[in-house]
Every structure is written in C-alpha cells, then in structure tokens.
Amino acid sequence: MTSSRVVAVIDVGSNSVRLLVARQLTASAFEVVDEEKLEARLGEGHAGGQLTPAGMDRGLRALRIMAQVADSHSPSAIAAVGTEALRRAENAGEFIARARLESGLAVRVLSPAEEAFASFLGTINSTGLRDGYLVDVGGGSLEVIRVEGRGLADSRSVPLGAIYATERYFRSDPPSAKDVRALRKAVRASITVSSGPPVLYGVGGAARNLARIVRLQRQYPLRRLHGFTIARRELSRLTRALTTRSADERRRIPGLASSRLDILPAAAVVIDEVMEMVGAPELHISGQGLREGIAWQELRGDRPILGDVRGASIAGLARANGVDELSSEPVVSAAAALFEATAARHRLGPEWLDLLLAGARLAGIGLHVDYYNRDRHAEYLVHSGDLHGFSHREVVLLGALVRAGHGGSADLAAYRSLVLPTDAADVTLLGAMLGVARAVRRRTPSPVLRFEPRLDGGTLHLQLAGKGGLDAELYDLEREAKRLETALKLQVVLRLSD
C-alpha cells in the first residue's frame, strides 16, 4: 500500500489565494483533506504596474492563514505558487520577501508555460479529454491550451483575466454594448485557435461559477460541477444576462457568488468568445486545475500524467472508503466471466462491461458507513465521490449499479434528464450479475477455486468447484440466481464439481 503522503498547494492568484491539502491514496490517486480560499484581490488596481498597498496587505493576510492551515496537516511539502499578478507587478519582489518573513512561505512565480502545464495536468488527470482545448480565466490572465493525444500541444497566456478585463474594458455597470464588443475583439486579437476538434473544457473559479448558475436554472439532479456541461446557447444567454444587468440586478441571480459579482460578466464574455472561436457546442467543466496539477507534480515527480484516469479514480475512491482494491478482484473476475458468458443473451456493449467491473470494484464502499443501509450509502458515495473520467450519466448508472448489486431494481426516475429510457433495465441486469458475482465470492478468503458460467440455449449453468463446503455460497447464489433469471429471462442452474 502506498504511504499516505500529504502535500499542500497554495495558489496566489490575482483574484483569490487558495489552499489545497491532498493526501496520497495510491500511486495514482489522492484525496482532498482540506481547502481554504480568501478573495484577496491581489491584482486589483494593478493597471499602473504595481501591487497596491491594500492588495499586498490582503494577499499577505491570506498567506498567513493558508500557512497556518497547511502546517496543521504536517505536509511533506508546501508548494506556494504565484501567477499573473506577481508576474506583472514591478514590486512583486517586495511582496515575495514580505511573504517569506510574515508566513514562512517561499512563493515561486510560475512562468506562463508552467502555469499552463499545471492547469493542463489537473484537467487531463481528472477528465476523459484527449484532443481539444482548455480555457482558464483567472483574475489576471486568460489561458487557452491546445491538447493533442492527451499531451499539451500549445498554450497562450494573455492579461485578459476577470479583474484586468473588467478594469480595462468595462467603463460602466452594466457595461455598454461597445465595451463588450471591445473585450471580444481583444480576445480574438490575443488568441489564435488552430483547426482541431471543437472540444472545450473550462477550468477555474469563473467557469465553475457559470456552471453553478446554469445548474440551478436547469434544476439539475446532481450537485457535481466536475463533468457538468453548458450548451453554447445557455452560455450565450447567461453572458447577455450578466452584461445587461447592474450589480444589484445580478445579485439576484441564484448561484452567482457575491465575491464575483463585479468580475463574472467580463469572465463570461471571454469564455463565450473563446467558445465561439473553437466552435464548441458545449463547455465541459473541469473541477480540477492548477492546484491539483501542482499536487500531481509533487506526488508523481517527472511522471505526473496518469495512464488510466478512470481506473485510478475507482481505486482511489475504493481506498478512501476502506476497500482495498486487490480484495475486490475476485468479484471483478466473476462478474466479467458472467458478462462474457451471457453476451449472446444481453447483447450489451463493452461500455457496459466497463461499468460492471467498476461497480464490482466499488461494491463494498458503503459498508464502513452503515452495514444495514450500505446500498444507499454506496450510491451516495459514488455520486459525491472523486470520480474522474466518467460522464454524469455514467456516474448515475454506476451509483444505481452498486445499489442494485445489493438487491432490487435500479430506480432512475430522479435522473430522467440524464439517462436513456432503457438504462434502468440494463442497470438492473448488471446489478443481478454483480449480486451473483458477490455471492460466488461470499467469503474472504474465498474457498471457491473455479467459477464457470456457461449459456446453453435458454439455460445458464453456473458451475463451482472449491475446497471444503460451499454451503454459504450456494445459499447466497440460490437467492441471487432468481434475480438473474428474471433479468435475463432464462433458467439458472447451479452445479458443484470436483
């Protein structure tokens, strides 16, 4: 088992100073154990090229707070990094010197390329993105990153972040149509988008805040922002609403963070314009970015990019909830054998096999909360856990599967806007398969040495061989086999062999 290293990352941004404390779960997964955020507005009033005294004081107070919280976790490393505000300020050296003196933190100013790589790394290690673009609108800078084959192909960083864009281009509140056009023109003049897949991921607090507003407008059934998608027309409509209303009117928009009341309109215009340039029909939200990217660099050194995002997050979620992934492999193997043996009957594709195996690896995660309601807790943990690389539909199906694996049918009524009409029946079938697989491996260590499912016409033969008596397994299988018979509409026959 990987030792539980703890690292802390402090992001000194133009708008906010943020802390992330991460504990390593496996070689490919970590869990967040603490976070803190302070809207320091370090870059506010920065047009003259200097950090203002008030901005410095706010930033230094934030760093003192972050250092105290980080130190309480006894991390093996604290990485404090600065971005656009410190790159541009002529008096950044004074701020960095005072930060070391007052908080003990050595703030390292990232180059545009280093910042882009960290944002890329946090996103690529938490999504299924292979080819496309990232847009990250911070307080000071706008970054557009091109991704090819899960690698960083190109990046561009310009001072068009939410604070700087607001101060430079918006002369009134709400801004005039002329001001909005000027900001859009500046984005197009600063950023070049080459031909490529029209796939766009939004990183950072501004993108998340826009997603939170849209999620509330839709009455969306999941609370997750990571993996949420905003349609092009939704973002355009929201951008118009933000730029045609005064601050008092914007304050009444559900989900709009009060700390972004004055700067979200400019951020929305910038993201909307990049979306238009890319030709993306929707904006995918990444809940992870620069801080997580720095954490990956601290934890994985010169091999920070994960090879299997989905597998890593499944293993991490299992480990975070008291399940050793190796102990679940016998159930995974039995579930895979059952799926393959009945393929001619159910005709489900490989994506469903992947879902079944993920469910088998997570089947025990609700036990540590409450044994008697483990199915309900398992579903909740899937919905709220740190699952990466899965669409929201897949998260819903996986949660329903781990619950159905403990008995019963999948109930997806609350998620009609996310799932297909046939999904409930298919998940119920997979839940029955998972129930059989868990029955085969009823005990740990399992006395079952061989499990051979075989489909013969309208009959499914389940043959077991093992050491000692298998009465416990057979008792469980008799019950679970009835569910499988109903789901597959065939007869299930249990057999013991030498």
Image (cartoon, rainbow, N blue to C red):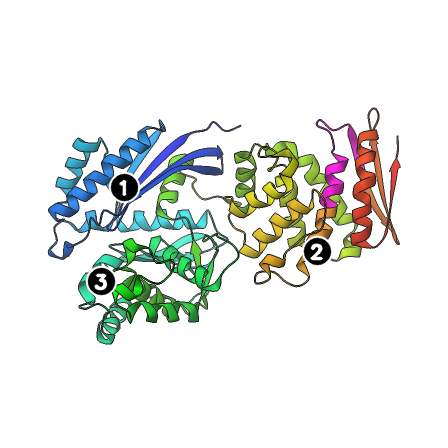
- Residue under numbered circle 3: 166
Q: Is residue 2 above or below residue 356?
A: above
Query: How many angstroms separate mark 3 from mark 2 (CA)?
Result: 50 Å
Of marks 3 and 1, the one in the foreground: 3
Kindly identify the amino acid type of the residue bearing the numbered disc 2.
Asp
Q: Is residue 328 magenta?
A: no
Residue 259 horizontal side relative to residue 196, left or right: left
- Tell which of 320 and 76 is nearer to you: 320
Tell me which segment is drawn in magenta: 433-452
Compared with residue 234, is residue 15 higher up or lower down, i.e. above or below?
above
Q: Badge 2, how many Cα within 10 Å: few under 14, some, many 20+? A: some
10 Å neighbourhood of mark 3: few (<14), some, or many (≥20)? many
Tell me: 296 left or right of 446.
left
Q: What kind of element bears circle 3?
A: helix
Q: Position of residue 368 (x, y in %)?
A: 58, 32
Whether residue 451 appears in magenta in the rendering, the answer is: yes
**Would you call the spot at circle 1 few (<14 residues within 10 Å), some (14-19), or many (20 or more)?**
many
